[in-house]
Amino acid sequence: VYISMANLIVEAIPDHACLQLGVGTLPNVLGEILCTTDLKDLGIHSEMFCDSMVDLFEAGKITGRYKTTDRGKIAVTFCLGTNKTYEFVDENPIMASHPCDYTNNPNVISSNDNVISINNAIEIDLFCQVSAESSGIRQISGSGGQVDFVEGAWHSRGGKSFLCLTSTYTDKQGQVHSRIVPTLKTGSIITTPRTFVDYVVTEYGKAQMKGQSTWSRAEKLINLAHPDFRDDLVRQAQEMKIWRRTNKIQ
């Protein structure tokens, strides 16, 4: 699943891109795949520094040569990984450690060209509202810098942001649920507003949401949902009057 999602993102990354990776399995899988590509002269401007970034540097993919800010350096706020990552950053002059009011400043982020921002989501509804921190009132994570980098990537020349989620999850009782839902659960925190969302990625594809109408977003998201849930999502979208039979799902 994560390999499929990572491959969908990799095909959208150009040479000289400036990367931001969020927390989770996907960033590390993405880093492994990027190491095998022909991409060159990538940069890093990210709140978090993780294992996959070490791999990318050691594979010769990271030079920071084309960054506008902290050129030639890896700009981060904190590090989260294994011992190899902590050993890499220890007294390493290539690292530029900044407070988050710098790394997460959308104006600073967007001053770099081709910013590629990659973050995870817990649920997304058919209006394209994204929760990346709670399921209903159950707190799972924090807001982090997701919105900052989504906005920064949008204003970056050539930039793109990707909000990624597996199409389903299995609860403790073994029941499978869709992560793409008609509406977010009552009490769910909206991490990224629908108007900010650029690309959404599941194992079934990626789709750009920016600038789309409400019914178009619903259609695209239903296409990204697990096939077992699509008919029910269409039915519920019809009941909410944000999808109609004349809208053809590709």
Image (cartoon, grey):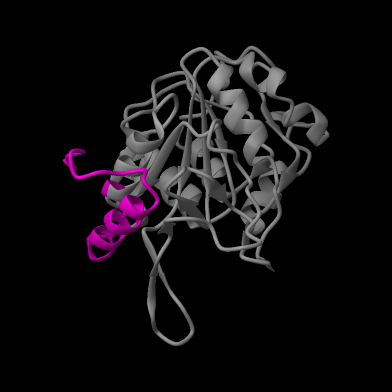
Q: Position of residue 68 (x, y in %)?
A: 64, 12
Seen from the viewer's position, the closer of residues 14 and 240 is 240
Seen from the viewer's position, the closer of residues 53 and 152 is 152
Asked whether, in this view, residue 90 is left or right of residue 39, the answer is: right
Q: Position of residue 74 (x, y in %)?
A: 65, 29
Residue lying at 59% horizontally and 38% vertically, measured from the top left:
193
The answer to whether any part of residue 35 appears in the image is no
Reply above or below: 122 against 113.
below
Q: Quadrant of the C terminus?
A: top left
Q: Quadrant of the N terminus?
A: bottom left
Residue lying at 66% horizontally and 44% vertically, measured from the top left:
88
Reply above or below: 42 against 120.
above
The answer to whether any part of residue 53 appears in the image is yes
Asked whether, in this view, residue 116 is left or right of residue 23, the answer is: left
Residue lying at 54% horizontally and 56% vertically, measured from the top left:
24
Reply above or below: 182 against 102.
below
101 is within the stretch colored magenta: no
Asked whether, in this view, residue 147 is left or right of residue 116, the answer is: right
Residue 151 position by quadrant: top right
In the rendered structure, which segment of residues is drawn in magenta? 223-250
